[in-house]
Image (spheres, rainbow, N blue to C red):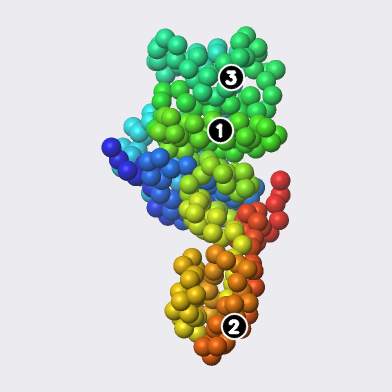
Amino acid sequence: MEHSILETINLTKKFGNQKAVDCVNVQLNRGDIYGFIGKNGAGKTTFLKMISGLSTPTSGTIELFGCRGKEVNQQYSRVGVLIENPGIFPELSAYENLKLKCICAGIRKKGYINEILDIVGLSHTGKKKTRKFSVGMKQRLGIAMALIGEPELLILDEPINGLDPEGIAEIRDTIVRLNHEKKQTIIISSHILEELSKIANRYGIIDQGKMVKELTKEELVSECSDKLELKLSHPEKAVPVLKDMGFCDFKLIDSETIHIFEQLDRSGKIVMELSRQAIEIKSIVVVGLGIEEYFLQLTGGVHHA
Ligand code: ATP
């Protein structure tokens, strides 16, 4: 079984002179929940459409389940997609909508539709027409439609956009369950990093078509948690001193900075000890960013919700 599910190499899409997606490299490994984050207009939908086979790249390469070029098309039966309008018939129930999709996909397994309704938490909706569904219910039905055919990769474009906190929590829950129980690899976009901060294991942050940062969940937590920031002329000299003081969880960031992630209340002791060793300290402060502040710092601006 392939470990790499999807790889894009310098994937680019131009509309006229505008590069909506500019040389984006993403690698998805089996089992990942990849949070694809960017403000409105950053290029998320354009990127997701290209990897779904719904739009042709201007340049760059897509490798899907180890296949490139024309062979990629044969792999799309292993991919479930929810992008923009999921194509729900308003006069039909959730069951009937899914049944139609199953007929188109040639799936006749008994109990299959109920199983999918159950996964997305819509088994109670009975004969209710989908035009009477809430936004959250429609989003969950959209995910259910994407699940038909047991895809190994799910591509979900802003499935939590416009939902209330309860709806967001339900979708998050569904996604985590699909990932754990069905072992599905998922790429999910959002314009709010915080909304995905509890579920994704990897993040790509895109701004004006370009990937500005890729990081793991652990790196995100570390970037956003409080830490002691120590500025020194020669930080390497401070390393053995910190070790002698019993610090283990710290990192040399650049030629003048050390971040310390533990015992934040010992800054006074650190200053005394470094001074005693004649190591000059430029500054020592506790720094910390909220997840959204961090996102705005990377993308350099305010949200346009
Ligand atoms: P949103 O959250 O608003 O959907 P997004 O991150 O998904 O934003 P895209 O929809 O991919 O962003 O759009 C990226 C840029 O490409 C935008 O400037 C948009 O106006 C432009 N764009 C998207 N589709 C087209 C198109 N078919 N023709 C021309 N420009 C387009």
Location of residue 267 by image quarter: bottom right
Circle 1 crowding by C-alpha within 10 Å: few under 14, some 14–19, many from 20: some
Does residue 22 appear to the left or right of 74 in the view shown? right
Asked whether 97 or 264 is in front, the reply is 264
Res 121 visible: yes
Tag 3 residue:
122
Name which residue type carries label 3: Leu
Q: Residue at position x 55%, y 64% from top?
A: 262
Q: Which residue is mark 1?
A: 173
Of residue 204 and residue 196, the one placed in the foreground of this image is 196
Secondary element under disc 1, as helix, strand or loop, is: helix
Distance from disc 1 to disc 2, alpha carbons, whole Å, reads 48 Å
> Is 247 positioned to the left or the right of 141 in the image?
left
Amino acid marked by disc 2:
Met
**Viewer-side residue, 267 vs 119:** 267
Q: Secondary structure at mark 2?
A: helix
Report the residue at 59% width, 58% height from top: 224
Image spot of residue 221 (x, y percent): 55, 55
Q: Position of residue 173 (x, y in %)?
A: 56, 33
Which of the 4 image quarters holds residue 232? Answer: bottom right
At label 1, the amino acid type is: Asp
* 20, above or below 153, in the image: below
Which residue has dot 2 on it? 272
Separation (CA) of disc 2 from disc 3 = 62 Å
